Amino acid sequence: MSAVSLKGVRKTFDGHAVIKNVDLEAQPGEFLVMVGPSGCGKTTLLRLIAGLETADAGSIAIGGREVSALPPRDRDVAMVFQSYALYPHMSVRENLAFGLRLRKFPKADIAERVSAAAELLELSPLLDRRPKALSGGQRQRVAMGRAIVRQPRVFLFDEPLSNLDTALRVQMRGELARLHRRLGATMIYVTHDQVEAMTLANRVAVFNQGEMQQVGPPLELYHRPANRFVACFLGSPSMNILPVRREGAVLRGQGFSVPVPEDLGDASSDRLLVGVRPQELLICRDGMMSGEVEAIERLGFDGYAFLSTPAGKVAARFSRDASVCVGDKVGAEPVGDAMHVFLEDGRALRHPRLSSH
Protein backbone atom coordinates (compact mmCIF):
# COMPACT_ATOMS: atom_id res chain seq x y z
CA MET A 1 0.00 0.00 0.00
CA SER A 2 1.35 3.40 -0.97
CA ALA A 3 0.15 6.97 -0.74
CA VAL A 4 -0.14 9.06 -3.90
CA SER A 5 0.53 12.76 -3.48
CA LEU A 6 -0.01 15.52 -6.03
CA LYS A 7 1.14 19.05 -5.27
CA GLY A 8 0.62 22.05 -7.55
CA VAL A 9 0.09 19.84 -10.60
CA ARG A 10 -0.68 21.69 -13.84
CA LYS A 11 -1.11 20.58 -17.43
CA THR A 12 -1.91 22.44 -20.63
CA PHE A 13 -2.66 21.25 -24.16
CA ASP A 14 -2.20 23.74 -27.01
CA GLY A 15 -2.26 26.61 -24.55
CA HIS A 16 -5.46 25.42 -22.88
CA ALA A 17 -5.15 24.64 -19.15
CA VAL A 18 -6.79 21.27 -18.46
CA ILE A 19 -5.32 20.75 -14.96
CA LYS A 20 -5.06 23.87 -12.82
CA ASN A 21 -2.79 23.67 -9.79
CA VAL A 22 -4.24 20.50 -8.22
CA ASP A 23 -3.26 19.38 -4.71
CA LEU A 24 -4.58 15.92 -3.83
CA GLU A 25 -3.46 12.95 -1.75
CA ALA A 26 -4.68 9.35 -1.77
CA GLN A 27 -3.90 7.64 1.54
CA PRO A 28 -2.36 4.13 1.63
CA GLY A 29 -5.09 1.55 1.06
CA GLU A 30 -7.70 4.17 0.16
CA PHE A 31 -10.29 3.91 -2.61
CA LEU A 32 -10.27 7.46 -3.99
CA VAL A 33 -12.73 8.31 -6.75
CA MET A 34 -12.21 11.32 -9.02
CA VAL A 35 -15.53 12.38 -10.51
CA GLY A 36 -16.77 15.16 -12.74
CA PRO A 37 -18.36 15.89 -16.12
CA SER A 38 -16.68 14.99 -19.39
CA GLY A 39 -13.73 17.28 -20.10
CA CYS A 40 -13.11 18.25 -16.46
CA GLY A 41 -9.55 16.83 -16.50
CA LYS A 42 -9.97 13.74 -14.33
CA THR A 43 -8.64 11.25 -16.91
CA THR A 44 -5.72 13.54 -17.73
CA LEU A 45 -4.85 13.63 -14.02
CA LEU A 46 -4.95 9.83 -13.88
CA ARG A 47 -2.65 9.62 -16.91
CA LEU A 48 -0.27 12.05 -15.21
CA ILE A 49 -0.10 9.73 -12.19
CA ALA A 50 0.52 6.77 -14.49
CA GLY A 51 3.25 8.61 -16.42
CA LEU A 52 1.37 8.48 -19.73
CA GLU A 53 1.40 12.29 -19.74
CA THR A 54 3.97 14.70 -18.32
CA ALA A 55 2.94 17.53 -15.99
CA ASP A 56 3.96 21.07 -16.89
CA ALA A 57 4.46 21.94 -13.21
CA GLY A 58 4.10 20.44 -9.74
CA SER A 59 5.17 17.16 -8.18
CA ILE A 60 3.76 13.62 -8.13
CA ALA A 61 4.94 11.20 -5.45
CA ILE A 62 4.07 7.51 -4.95
CA GLY A 63 4.97 5.94 -1.64
CA GLY A 64 6.93 9.05 -0.72
CA ARG A 65 9.11 8.82 -3.84
CA GLU A 66 9.03 11.59 -6.44
CA VAL A 67 8.04 10.00 -9.77
CA SER A 68 7.32 13.02 -11.99
CA ALA A 69 10.39 12.32 -14.15
CA LEU A 70 10.06 8.52 -14.18
CA PRO A 71 8.64 6.53 -17.12
CA PRO A 72 5.46 4.49 -16.52
CA ARG A 73 7.29 1.18 -16.11
CA ASP A 74 9.25 2.56 -13.13
CA ARG A 75 6.27 3.95 -11.20
CA ASP A 76 4.94 0.57 -10.01
CA VAL A 77 1.33 1.31 -10.92
CA ALA A 78 -1.17 -0.72 -12.94
CA MET A 79 -3.90 0.88 -15.01
CA VAL A 80 -7.25 -0.56 -16.12
CA PHE A 81 -8.62 1.29 -19.13
CA GLN A 82 -12.15 1.96 -20.36
CA SER A 83 -11.58 -0.46 -23.23
CA TYR A 84 -10.66 -3.97 -22.13
CA ALA A 85 -7.61 -3.97 -24.45
CA LEU A 86 -7.35 -7.77 -24.40
CA TYR A 87 -5.35 -9.65 -27.02
CA PRO A 88 -8.01 -11.52 -29.05
CA HIS A 89 -5.65 -14.31 -30.18
CA MET A 90 -4.59 -15.13 -26.61
CA SER A 91 -6.43 -17.16 -23.99
CA VAL A 92 -7.43 -15.65 -20.66
CA ARG A 93 -4.40 -17.33 -19.10
CA GLU A 94 -2.07 -15.84 -21.72
CA ASN A 95 -3.63 -12.38 -21.38
CA LEU A 96 -3.10 -12.48 -17.62
CA ALA A 97 0.49 -13.65 -17.97
CA PHE A 98 1.56 -11.43 -20.87
CA GLY A 99 2.83 -8.46 -18.85
CA LEU A 100 4.79 -10.70 -16.51
CA ARG A 101 6.38 -12.54 -19.43
CA LEU A 102 7.54 -9.22 -20.89
CA ARG A 103 9.20 -8.45 -17.57
CA LYS A 104 11.00 -11.82 -17.64
CA PHE A 105 9.35 -13.25 -14.53
CA PRO A 106 10.15 -16.91 -13.82
CA LYS A 107 7.53 -19.30 -15.21
CA ALA A 108 6.70 -20.65 -11.77
CA ASP A 109 6.03 -17.15 -10.43
CA ILE A 110 3.86 -16.32 -13.43
CA ALA A 111 1.79 -19.48 -12.99
CA GLU A 112 1.34 -18.78 -9.27
CA ARG A 113 0.26 -15.16 -9.78
CA VAL A 114 -2.10 -16.01 -12.64
CA SER A 115 -3.71 -18.79 -10.61
CA ALA A 116 -4.17 -16.52 -7.58
CA ALA A 117 -5.70 -13.69 -9.66
CA ALA A 118 -8.00 -16.09 -11.50
CA GLU A 119 -9.25 -17.53 -8.22
CA LEU A 120 -9.79 -14.08 -6.73
CA LEU A 121 -11.79 -12.95 -9.76
CA GLU A 122 -13.59 -16.28 -10.31
CA LEU A 123 -11.91 -16.75 -13.68
CA SER A 124 -10.39 -20.18 -13.05
CA PRO A 125 -12.93 -22.08 -15.25
CA LEU A 126 -12.33 -19.59 -18.09
CA LEU A 127 -8.53 -19.63 -18.29
CA ASP A 128 -8.42 -21.48 -21.62
CA ARG A 129 -11.06 -19.37 -23.34
CA ARG A 130 -10.35 -16.49 -25.69
CA PRO A 131 -11.89 -13.03 -25.16
CA LYS A 132 -14.54 -13.51 -27.89
CA ALA A 133 -16.02 -16.34 -25.80
CA LEU A 134 -16.44 -14.13 -22.72
CA SER A 135 -19.19 -11.79 -21.59
CA GLY A 136 -18.52 -8.09 -21.06
CA GLY A 137 -18.27 -8.57 -17.30
CA GLN A 138 -15.86 -11.48 -17.70
CA ARG A 139 -13.66 -9.45 -20.06
CA GLN A 140 -13.53 -6.62 -17.56
CA ARG A 141 -12.49 -9.06 -14.84
CA VAL A 142 -9.67 -10.28 -17.10
CA ALA A 143 -8.55 -6.67 -17.59
CA MET A 144 -8.53 -6.21 -13.81
CA GLY A 145 -6.72 -9.53 -13.38
CA ARG A 146 -3.96 -8.34 -15.69
CA ALA A 147 -3.41 -5.45 -13.28
CA ILE A 148 -3.63 -7.64 -10.17
CA VAL A 149 -0.91 -10.07 -11.27
CA ARG A 150 1.49 -7.13 -11.41
CA GLN A 151 1.01 -6.64 -7.64
CA PRO A 152 1.56 -2.88 -8.05
CA ARG A 153 1.72 -0.24 -5.36
CA VAL A 154 -1.26 1.59 -6.83
CA PHE A 155 -4.20 0.60 -9.06
CA LEU A 156 -5.55 3.20 -11.50
CA PHE A 157 -9.00 2.76 -13.08
CA ASP A 158 -10.17 4.88 -16.02
CA GLU A 159 -13.96 4.49 -16.28
CA PRO A 160 -13.67 0.69 -16.40
CA LEU A 161 -17.43 0.01 -16.23
CA SER A 162 -18.68 2.51 -18.81
CA ASN A 163 -19.03 -0.10 -21.58
CA LEU A 164 -21.22 -2.43 -19.51
CA ASP A 165 -25.00 -2.52 -19.34
CA THR A 166 -26.81 -1.40 -16.19
CA ALA A 167 -27.11 -4.83 -14.54
CA LEU A 168 -23.44 -5.64 -15.18
CA ARG A 169 -22.35 -2.26 -13.87
CA VAL A 170 -24.11 -2.93 -10.58
CA GLN A 171 -22.55 -6.40 -10.38
CA MET A 172 -19.07 -5.13 -11.20
CA ARG A 173 -19.33 -2.31 -8.63
CA GLY A 174 -19.83 -5.00 -6.03
CA GLU A 175 -16.88 -6.95 -7.43
CA LEU A 176 -14.63 -3.89 -7.27
CA ALA A 177 -15.61 -3.15 -3.68
CA ARG A 178 -14.93 -6.77 -2.73
CA LEU A 179 -11.61 -6.69 -4.58
CA HIS A 180 -10.53 -3.59 -2.68
CA ARG A 181 -11.38 -5.20 0.65
CA ARG A 182 -9.46 -8.35 -0.26
CA LEU A 183 -6.35 -6.62 -1.58
CA GLY A 184 -6.31 -3.58 0.73
CA ALA A 185 -4.52 -1.75 -2.09
CA THR A 186 -4.49 1.95 -2.92
CA MET A 187 -6.96 2.51 -5.76
CA ILE A 188 -7.67 5.70 -7.71
CA TYR A 189 -10.77 5.49 -9.86
CA VAL A 190 -12.05 7.92 -12.50
CA THR A 191 -15.72 8.11 -13.49
CA HIS A 192 -18.39 10.57 -14.54
CA ASP A 193 -21.01 8.36 -12.83
CA GLN A 194 -21.92 9.80 -9.44
CA VAL A 195 -23.50 6.48 -8.35
CA GLU A 196 -20.15 4.73 -8.78
CA ALA A 197 -18.46 7.52 -6.86
CA MET A 198 -20.93 7.45 -3.97
CA THR A 199 -20.98 3.65 -3.61
CA LEU A 200 -17.30 2.77 -4.13
CA ALA A 201 -15.26 5.59 -2.61
CA ASN A 202 -13.71 6.11 0.79
CA ARG A 203 -13.32 9.68 -0.44
CA VAL A 204 -14.56 11.50 -3.53
CA ALA A 205 -12.74 14.33 -5.32
CA VAL A 206 -15.07 16.42 -7.52
CA PHE A 207 -13.54 18.20 -10.51
CA ASN A 208 -14.80 20.86 -12.88
CA GLN A 209 -12.88 22.59 -15.69
CA GLY A 210 -9.53 21.32 -14.43
CA GLU A 211 -10.01 22.44 -10.83
CA MET A 212 -10.75 20.32 -7.79
CA GLN A 213 -13.94 21.64 -6.24
CA GLN A 214 -14.06 19.53 -3.07
CA VAL A 215 -12.69 16.29 -1.62
CA GLY A 216 -14.07 14.24 1.26
CA PRO A 217 -16.24 11.25 2.23
CA PRO A 218 -19.18 10.76 -0.15
CA LEU A 219 -21.93 11.62 2.34
CA GLU A 220 -20.07 14.71 3.53
CA LEU A 221 -20.01 16.03 -0.05
CA TYR A 222 -23.67 15.13 -0.53
CA HIS A 223 -24.91 16.79 2.67
CA ARG A 224 -22.37 19.62 2.92
CA PRO A 225 -21.28 20.58 -0.61
CA ALA A 226 -18.72 23.36 -0.76
CA ASN A 227 -20.43 25.10 -3.66
CA ARG A 228 -23.32 25.01 -6.08
CA PHE A 229 -21.45 22.87 -8.61
CA VAL A 230 -20.79 20.03 -6.14
CA ALA A 231 -24.35 20.29 -4.81
CA CYS A 232 -25.85 19.94 -8.27
CA PHE A 233 -23.43 17.31 -9.58
CA LEU A 234 -23.99 14.85 -6.71
CA GLY A 235 -27.56 13.63 -6.44
CA SER A 236 -30.17 12.56 -8.96
CA PRO A 237 -32.33 14.36 -9.90
CA SER A 238 -30.09 17.37 -9.46
CA MET A 239 -30.62 19.77 -6.56
CA ASN A 240 -33.23 22.49 -7.18
CA ILE A 241 -31.56 25.91 -7.19
CA LEU A 242 -33.87 28.90 -6.74
CA PRO A 243 -32.81 32.59 -6.69
CA VAL A 244 -34.09 34.57 -3.70
CA ARG A 245 -33.70 38.00 -2.14
CA ARG A 246 -33.23 38.48 1.58
CA GLU A 247 -35.98 40.79 2.86
CA GLY A 248 -35.81 41.12 6.62
CA ALA A 249 -36.83 37.78 8.16
CA VAL A 250 -37.86 36.29 4.79
CA LEU A 251 -36.10 34.83 1.77
CA ARG A 252 -38.38 35.76 -1.13
CA GLY A 253 -38.27 34.09 -4.52
CA GLN A 254 -40.49 34.24 -7.58
CA GLY A 255 -43.84 32.92 -6.38
CA PHE A 256 -42.67 31.68 -2.96
CA SER A 257 -41.07 32.77 0.29
CA VAL A 258 -39.49 31.01 3.27
CA PRO A 259 -38.33 32.21 6.69
CA VAL A 260 -34.64 33.08 6.99
CA PRO A 261 -32.96 30.18 8.84
CA GLU A 262 -31.71 31.20 12.29
CA ASP A 263 -28.21 29.93 11.54
CA LEU A 264 -27.85 31.72 8.20
CA GLY A 265 -24.63 33.72 8.26
CA ASP A 266 -24.04 37.18 6.94
CA ALA A 267 -23.68 37.69 3.21
CA SER A 268 -22.18 40.55 1.24
CA SER A 269 -25.35 40.69 -0.87
CA ASP A 270 -29.05 40.17 -0.26
CA ARG A 271 -29.22 38.17 -3.48
CA LEU A 272 -28.84 34.48 -2.62
CA LEU A 273 -29.64 31.02 -3.97
CA VAL A 274 -31.74 28.46 -2.11
CA GLY A 275 -31.03 24.79 -2.80
CA VAL A 276 -33.40 21.92 -1.98
CA ARG A 277 -32.84 18.35 -3.10
CA PRO A 278 -35.82 16.72 -4.88
CA GLN A 279 -35.74 13.94 -2.26
CA GLU A 280 -36.44 16.61 0.40
CA LEU A 281 -39.23 18.36 -1.52
CA LEU A 282 -42.58 16.58 -1.31
CA ILE A 283 -45.53 16.94 -3.69
CA CYS A 284 -48.67 18.02 -1.82
CA ARG A 285 -51.91 19.90 -2.34
CA ASP A 286 -50.66 23.17 -0.85
CA GLY A 287 -47.03 23.96 -0.20
CA MET A 288 -44.20 26.47 -0.24
CA MET A 289 -44.61 26.78 -4.01
CA SER A 290 -46.97 25.58 -6.71
CA GLY A 291 -46.60 24.62 -10.32
CA GLU A 292 -47.79 22.46 -13.20
CA VAL A 293 -46.53 18.92 -13.67
CA GLU A 294 -44.61 18.69 -16.97
CA ALA A 295 -43.12 15.19 -16.64
CA ILE A 296 -43.11 12.24 -14.26
CA GLU A 297 -40.58 9.53 -13.37
CA ARG A 298 -42.17 6.58 -11.56
CA LEU A 299 -39.53 4.48 -9.82
CA GLY A 300 -41.73 1.91 -8.08
CA PHE A 301 -41.51 2.76 -4.41
CA ASP A 302 -41.82 6.47 -5.16
CA GLY A 303 -41.22 8.86 -8.05
CA TYR A 304 -40.41 12.40 -9.14
CA ALA A 305 -42.57 15.07 -10.69
CA PHE A 306 -40.95 17.83 -12.71
CA LEU A 307 -42.81 21.09 -12.29
CA SER A 308 -42.95 24.37 -14.14
CA THR A 309 -43.15 27.07 -11.46
CA PRO A 310 -42.80 30.88 -11.43
CA ALA A 311 -39.33 30.33 -9.92
CA GLY A 312 -38.26 27.94 -12.70
CA LYS A 313 -38.08 24.19 -13.22
CA VAL A 314 -38.39 22.19 -10.00
CA ALA A 315 -38.21 18.44 -9.26
CA ALA A 316 -40.10 17.02 -6.26
CA ARG A 317 -40.77 13.57 -4.85
CA PHE A 318 -44.11 11.82 -4.47
CA SER A 319 -45.02 8.54 -2.77
CA ARG A 320 -46.09 5.46 -4.68
CA ASP A 321 -49.68 5.92 -3.52
CA ALA A 322 -49.94 9.50 -4.80
CA SER A 323 -52.05 10.24 -7.86
CA VAL A 324 -49.93 12.60 -9.94
CA CYS A 325 -50.44 13.19 -13.65
CA VAL A 326 -48.91 15.43 -16.29
CA GLY A 327 -50.85 18.70 -16.39
CA ASP A 328 -51.85 18.63 -12.70
CA LYS A 329 -51.51 21.79 -10.64
CA VAL A 330 -49.73 20.76 -7.43
CA GLY A 331 -47.80 22.19 -4.50
CA ALA A 332 -44.36 21.29 -3.19
CA GLU A 333 -43.19 21.54 0.42
CA PRO A 334 -39.74 20.95 1.95
CA VAL A 335 -39.55 18.11 4.45
CA GLY A 336 -37.87 19.15 7.69
CA ASP A 337 -34.73 21.27 7.56
CA ALA A 338 -33.90 20.85 3.88
CA MET A 339 -32.57 24.25 2.85
CA HIS A 340 -29.07 24.83 1.48
CA VAL A 341 -28.16 28.47 0.85
CA PHE A 342 -25.48 29.65 -1.58
CA LEU A 343 -24.02 33.01 -2.45
CA GLU A 344 -24.58 34.30 -5.98
CA ASP A 345 -21.06 33.15 -6.94
CA GLY A 346 -21.95 29.59 -5.89
CA ARG A 347 -20.13 29.32 -2.56
CA ALA A 348 -22.08 27.53 0.17
CA LEU A 349 -23.37 29.73 2.98
CA ARG A 350 -25.63 27.32 4.86
CA HIS A 351 -26.50 23.60 4.97
CA PRO A 352 -29.37 21.76 6.63
CA ARG A 353 -28.56 20.87 10.23
CA LEU A 354 -29.65 17.28 9.87
CA SER A 355 -30.71 15.06 6.99
CA SER A 356 -34.40 14.27 7.12
CA HIS A 357 -33.67 10.61 6.31
Image: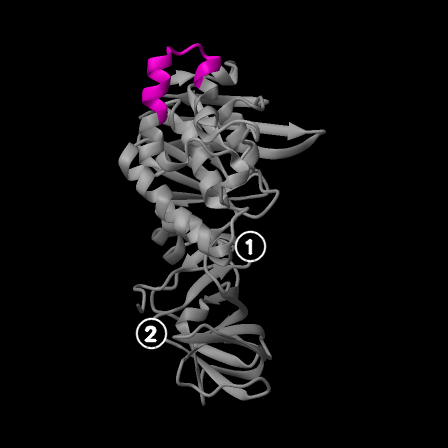
On the rendered image, what quadrant is the C terminus found in? bottom left
Tell me the kind of residue under disc 2. Answer: Gly
How many residues crowd mark 2 within 10 Å: few (<14), some (14–19), many (20+)?
some
Tell me the kind of residue under disc 1. Answer: Asp
Which residue in the rendered view is the most extreme toward the right? Answer: 14
Where are the magenta residues, as a range? 100-114
- The residue positioned 51% from the left and 33% from the top of the image is 130
- The residue positioned 60% from the left and 46% from the top of the image is 38
Which residue is tagged 2? 336
Residue 118 coordinates in the image, percent (x, y): 36, 32
Nearest the camera: 144 or 119? 119
On the rendered image, what quadrant is the N terminus found in? top left
Q: Quadrant of residue 211?
A: top right
Residue 192 coordinates in the image, percent (x, y): 52, 47
Q: Is residue 270 magenta?
A: no
Residue 327 position (above or below residue 62): below
Q: Main secondary structure of the magenta part?
A: helix
Q: CA distance from mark 2 to mark 1?
A: 26 Å
Residue 256 position (above or below residue 199): below
How many residues crowd mark 1 within 10 Å: few (<14), some (14–19), many (20+)?
few
Residue 208 coordinates in the image, percent (x, y): 55, 45
Give the number of the disc on residue 345.
1
Mark 2 or mark 1, earlier in chain: 2
